[in-house]
Amino acid sequence: MIREIAKKMREEKIIHNSMVCTYMLITKVLTVKELFESNKDFGLLFHPDDLEVLTGNQAIEIIDTLIEYFVELEDYEKCADLVEVKKDYL
């Protein structure tokens, strides 16, 4: 039971880290290069090489996923930032 809880906590941490890193790239808080240079483990909702060609429905789906995630966390500031970025893709 303790192992299952620890595993779940690790998975949630990985998901959270991926969401935050994706948010930082989408909102241009960080660049891909800066993220790689940070020497931190990170995940993304898309391949980093795709950032420059991220367009249309693919971008909207990623942004909507991020908004849903941050709404659940009640992090409305990030949601507002994402809504503004989403306008650029519409």
Image (cartoon, helix red, strand yellow):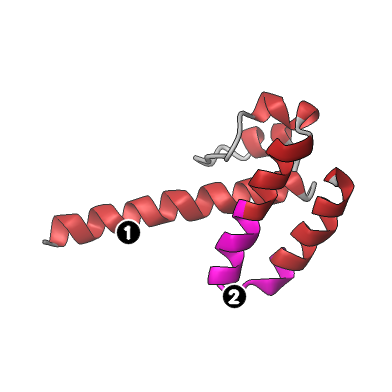
Circle 2: element type: loop
Residue 18: give x, y in percent of width and height.
54, 47
Frontmost residue, 64 versus 78: 64
On the picture, is 79 further left or further right than 66? right
The CA distance from mark 1 to mark 2 is 19 Å
Pointer 1: residues within 10 angstroms few (<14), some, or many (20+)?
A: few
> Looking at the picture, how far across and down is residue 48, in whole percent?
65, 29
Whether residue 56 appears in magenta in the rendering, the answer is: no
- Kindly identify which residue carries mark 1: 9
User: Which residue does the numbered mark 2 point to in the structure image?
Assistant: 74
Task: Report the predominant secondary structure element of the magenta stretch.
Answer: helix
Under tag 1, what secondary structure? helix
Query: Which residue type does callout 2 highlight?
Result: Glu
Q: Are marks 1 and 2 in contact (CB under 8 Å)?
A: no
Marks counted in the figure total 2
Q: Answer with left or right where residue 13 lies relative to residue 22.
A: left
Residue at x 32%, y 59% (from the top left corner) = 9
Toward the right, the furthest residue is 88
Q: Is residue 58 above or below residue 26?
A: above
Q: Residue at the location (78% across, 50% down)?
A: 27
Name the residue: 71% across, 65% down. Answer: 79
Q: Quadrant of residue 80?
A: bottom right
Q: Quadrant of residue 75?
A: bottom right
Which residues are the magenta region? 65-78
Is 77 covered by the magenta stretch?
yes
Image quarter where the N terminus lies is bottom left
Taking the spot 66% from the left edge, 45% from the top edge, the residue there is: 61
Give the amino acid type for the residue marked by disc 1 in the picture: Met
Q: Earlier in the sequence, mark 1 or mark 2?
A: 1
Task: Mark 1 vs mark 2: give the one in front.
Answer: 2
